[in-house]
Image (tube, grey):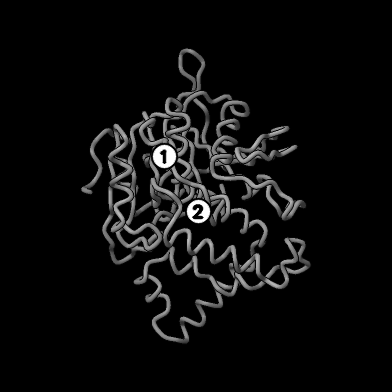
Amino acid sequence: MTDTSTSRPPVSGEYVFRDFPLQGGGRFDELRQGYLTLGDPRRDATGRIDNAVLLLHNTTGNSREWLAPTLAGELFGPGQPLDASRHFLIMPDAIGFGRSSKPSDGLRARFPNYRYHDIVLAQHRLLTEGLGIEHLRMIVGLSMGGMMAWLWGGLFPQFMDALVPIACQPGPMSGRNWLQRRMQIELIRNDPGWHGGDYIEQPAYYSRAPFGALMTQSAVHLQQQAPTREAADALYSRLVERARGGDANDRLYQLEASMDYDPRPLLERIEARVLAVNFSDDELNPAALGTLDAGIAKVRNAHAVLLPARPDSRGHHSALHAAHWKAELESFFAGAQPGPH
């Protein structure tokens, strides 16, 4: 994917940490943190960068996800909410994704066990040590990135002015979200070809059961793609092929990294303004659970928007289509209350 909103290409970079400790007690002798930037840093009278925005990707993406037309084309162009001529946009690859250190680089199942908390700490060090950023104007996160935005707000409450977690919940990893992850984990670990992570060919079981894809698209959108059995068979084949394009160890670690996610103890520490955006047809984060409302009630300056389904809704995947939520982001930037809850 390439950026479609500006004539300037994104800048790619890497920052390497030596002897990086993990919250669970392990450590990386060397941890590579990949990232992209778009736009230029602007400095205030004291020399501090004052226009930085951190953009966090989802569980099936990486930093380049933000360059897709459905995101960059709606957000980064002139006059758009995250206009790259005015903002310094930073898009890191989470640990285990993209150009950051991951199991498929060579360690396979001997890769240290990282969690979301560790990913956030690495991102903080990338900004402060690698890029010289002491403060962010905003953090926008999609799905997994939204969950990390909640953690960011509680772990570093004075580091940002605003948080925009999208398509996620400020509650523990549980319910159908964890069930679909656990299913994928078990399919990988119990595949006869897995061999403790030292497989010769990619294990095939988990790719043949793309249950996560069923949970991250709305039932209506799936029906539109597969209105007949033949069309459903063709869609199934495409989903299997897409899953086969990844690495099983990478996917296993990405899924297990979420297992202890629970931002609730941190919510009352958040000082930033918060706009939480969810979608009424998101099967992965059902509005009926009330998790978002309960979490928002603990945050001093927070507002939640539950966007109704519309003909082109995609359930959880609506997060990847900024046209669905950029109006709320624009209102939030302007200081107005976003749309109705």
The x and y percentages for residue 192 are 71, 73
The x and y percentages for residue 141 are 45, 45
| Quarter assignment of residue 190 | bottom right
Q: Nearer the viewer, residue 212 or 130?
A: 212
Q: Nearer the viewer, residue 161 or 155?
A: 155
Label 1: element kind: loop
Q: At 72% across and 33% down in the image, what residue appears?
A: 19
Label 2: element kind: loop
Instruction: Give the side of residue 231 with respect to residue 98, left or right.
Output: left
Q: At 44% across and 63% down in the image, what residue appears?
A: 216
Q: At 42% across and 28% down in the image, what residue appears?
A: 157
Q: Quadrant of the N terminus?
A: bottom right
Q: Nearer the viewer, residue 94 or 87?
A: 94
Instruction: Give the side of residue 2 with respect to residue 25, left or right.
Output: left
Residue receiving disc 2: 68
Residue receiving disc 1: 82
Amino acid carrying label 2: it is: Ala
* Disc 2: CA contacts within 10 A as few (<14), some (14-19) or many (>=20): some
The x and y percentages for residue 138 are 42, 34
Contact flag, marks 2 and 1 (Cβ < 8 Å):
no
In the rendered image of this protein, does residue 208 appear above or below residue 182? Answer: below
* Disc 1: CA contacts within 10 A as few (<14), some (14-19) or many (>=20): many
- Seen as rendered, the residue at the extreme left is 340
The x and y percentages for residue 333 are 32, 35
Label 2, label 1: how far apart the Cα atoms are: 14 Å
Could you say which disc has been placed on residue 211 in the image?
Answer: none
> Of marks 2 and 1, which one's residue comes earlier in the chain?
2
Amino acid carrying label 1: it is: Leu
